[in-house]
Image (cartoon, helix red, strand yellow):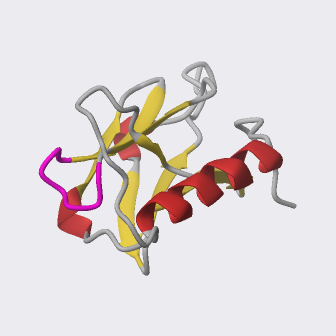
Amino acid sequence: MKKNPLNLDPKEELRRMQAMVERRFAHDPPVRSHDDEPIPVPVDASERDGILTIKAAVPGIRCDEVDVCISDHAVTFSNAPSCQCGRFLRTVELPEDWATSLARTRFRNGFVYVRIPKSTSRHASA
């Protein structure tokens, strides 16, 4: 059974996705100032068989335009300021006990997938 380990609010995620789609496909490009907030990246997370999967929607973006930064406590999706689609950014805080050093990232069909295995207990062999 899939779990939502990041406690994401589905309604808020839908609002973020709608805002992103509206900005991306607007007939008239919005006037953007340098202090505009970045476009939010909709994400979904699930845990299955000890693997945390975070899926970020980045429609219309090429894989070379997406940066994924994985730290011990968070995953950040962003892009270069020179990208024609506008700036986007989303940081997802991670729960404890995930082996971020073993994380794998994949880009496919407008989605970025980050898979992180659960850490094994340091005291299991003791």
Q: Is residue 82 magenta?
A: yes
Q: Residue furthest left?
A: 82
What residue is at 37 percent from the left and 59 percent from the top?
A: 105
- Quadrant housing the C terminus: top right
Range drawn in magenta? 80-86
What residue is at 70 percent from the left and 50 percent from the top?
A: 15
Q: Position of residue 76 (x, y in %)?
A: 39, 37
Quarter of the figure with residue 12:
top right
What residue is at 37 percent from the left and 53 percent from the top?
A: 30
What predominant SS class does the magenta segment belong to?
A: loop
Residue 4 in view: no
Q: Position of residue 102 (x, y in %)?
A: 38, 45
Q: Position of residue 71 (x, y in %)?
A: 36, 28
Q: Position of residue 34 (x, y in %)?
A: 23, 31
* 7 sits to left or right of 28: right
What residue is at 21 percent from the left and 60 percent from the top?
A: 65
* 90 sits to left or right of 88: right
Q: Is residue 31 magenta?
A: no
- Quadrant housing the N terminus: bottom right
Residue 23 in view: yes
Quarter of the figure with residue 108:
bottom left
In the figure, 57 relative to 44: above or below? below
* 2 sits to left or right of 50: right
